[in-house]
Image (cartoon, coloured by chain):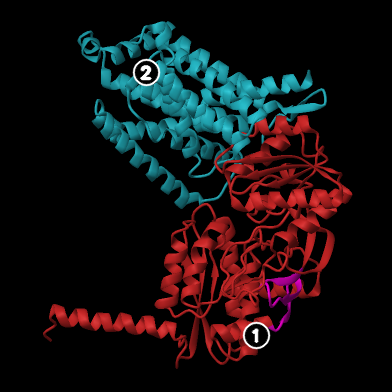
Amino acid sequence: MDSFVILCFAVVNSVALLALISLGLAVIFGMMRVINFAHGEFIMLGGYATVIANHCGVNLWLSMLVVAPMFVALIGAVAERLIVRRLYGHLVTTMLATWGLSLFLIGAVTAIFGNTTMGVSAPLGNIPIGAYSIGAYQLFLIGITALLVVSSLLALHWTKYGLIARAAMQNSEMAATLGINCDRVYAVTFIVGAAISGLAGALLAPISGVLPHMGAAYVARAFVTVISGGGALITGFLSAATILGPVEALLSYFATPVVGQASLLLLAVIILRLLPTGVSSLWTGGR
Amino acid sequence: MNLSRRTLLRSSAAVSAASVFGSLAGSASAASDTVTIASLYDLSGPFDVYGAPSNMCTEFAVKELNAAGGLLGKQVVLKAYDCQSDINKGPQYAQQAALRDRAVMAVGALTGAAREATRPVLRKYKVPYFYGSIYEGGACEQNIFCCNTEGNQQVVPLLEWSFKTLGKKLYYIASDYNAPRTFGAWNHVMAKREGGEVLADDYYPLDVTDFTAAIAKIQAAKPDFIHSCLVGGPSMSFYRQWAAAGMLKKIPIVSIIFGGGQEHEILAPEETNGIYAAYNYFQELDTPRNKAFLARFAQAMGQNHAYINGEAIGGYNTVMLWAEAVRRANSFDRDAVMKAWETGITWEGPGGKMVTDGPTHHTTQDVRIIRVENRVWSLVATKEQIQPDSYGGRCDVFAHPNQTEFLMPQM
């Protein structure tokens, strides 16, 4: 029984981590079709912002939940203004440009903080479950991921801004005719996506530490999740995370972590072979 | 001057031929009053946590030699290359060191992969390779001189002690590449010898940062202790998550690599307290010789130098053991230095007595089991004068002078 609870926890945790690292990308790539190769570095910057702020005496929760997303939103705003804005609609060019941005950010952080791991300890202690115990912080992580996903879903479908954003993404000319400033909508969406990525990095910092090149470990998994999810923005990547996460966690548990990682990728290949426009084409009809 | 293309080509060919023949003839240190040695450590990139402190120790060794009047009347010049945590840089810089700098000795290329890529180059140019990293053992060739612990010198005493003190059930968690897998093989050898049991061998790719499933698995297996050979920055997440799950006080961790990358300083004390490691050297070692060494070190390199761990000390020991061999040989020539090494030189280093071993080209040395508490290591047990493993006679440069193949431990 105890071991079953622990295993369920590992599975849910795996889904939550995939969702957490993918949400920012889902907003930027899913909505704007901007292949943001610097997504991993936005996560990394969020982690660094948290660790640095905390080392400077800022309360850990404040560093994670406020400082990090705001700082990365600022970086996102600058990147959008200087680079991404000029390249909307040019898929390959944005890919190269954001890749360059990613290399620049890794280099800059390495130059400033050095190529060494930094970190903060996980708060909240642990919760005993029978003979086992789990980190309470990881439960918090699962909770806040759920909260983030639900509020993004609500914001997109139940607020005026969500409606405008979706309109601008679907048909920017028509939206512009109706008096919507599409450039502004794009900019805000990009910044929100960056802020969410920064928050993800901040939340991950206590359990994984920060390194200048840590983004590489996340960016591939985030892309796999978002692309397997397909067109439906939030429900798409969420369903992909719900399929991929348990497979990875269970195979890591019962076989080896290498098998777990490999099967995640294999499963994504199979999904895309059967449903070329992603899991969500099952209920959106392939849009 | 009229320099035609033909004369330019001819003269440059002559120059390069001269430099090649020059170094092959071993006239490296002809009539100059300096002699050059090369270091090939990773001073940037993910392995700089190992490379930079090691290079610092090499620098200090050279300073100390020169302050004492140099070696055979020559000042020693250290040409430090930065291998940038890139395997390809090892052989490339080794070649430059041999041909351009006429180095008479090289240290560094610290990871197993870099060492294997670099040693053929140093062998080709007959530049003796003094290897100062802790490693899994098995590099047995004439041109390599291993000055730090090899697999059996670290893992055997640590596991012997662990099986006796901590319990019989071992759980192995390690990074997935050659060295941790070789160390993993030792778990089974030692479990058999000590009547223990290896519950699992879990290997993780180097970029994994989520260890939730791993921790669940360990909790389900209920081992008496964990043997960790996790390497690199991302893997440090394991210790964070292990402590966050409240397991640090419940199941002890032993490791032959923890601390070598300054993990005890990077992680918080509450994430590392009570972890055991095994090295020849640790900075807190309480001997008069080490105290004197640290005082000299602080004077030369500054009070706030990086922590000197069991990996970094290799940067010092290699140069000093080489210098001893040079003095006895009264020559910088590779073959003469090798002959001197093979006579069995006894040298007292910061980590105690070391004796060079002829047939294996390794060293007999002490190994200490240490425990960390609030970022400070303390001594738990010492195993004195452990001889290098002969690999059942296979590691013997007298019997197999041309052997270059990497040896695996026999079960």
The chain that hosts pointer 2 is A
Q: Secondary structure at mark 2?
A: loop
Figure check: A108 above or below B251: below
Q: Quarter of the image for the N terminus of chain B: give it.
A: bottom left
Q: Secondary structure at mark 1?
A: helix
Q: Residue placed farthest to the right in the image? A: B164
Say which mark, if any, is on residue A175.
none
Q: Residue at x 48, y 27 (%)?
A: A266
Figure check: B35 above or below B317: below
- Establish whether labels 2 and 1 are both on one chain: no
Residue type at the position of mark 1:
Ala
Q: Residue at x 74, y 62 (%)?
A: B153
Colour given to chain B in the rendered image: red
Say which mark, if any, is on residue B340.
1
Segment tinted magenta in the rendering: B343-365
Instruction: Give the x, y percent position of residue A101.
Output: 36, 40
Q: Residue at x 73, y 37 (%)?
A: B243
Instruction: Give the x, y percent position of residue B272.
Output: 73, 45
Q: Is residue B364 magenta?
A: yes
- The part of the image, by quadrant, that contains residue A135 is top right
Q: Which chain is cyan?
A: A
- The part of the image, by quadrant, that contains residue A106 is top left
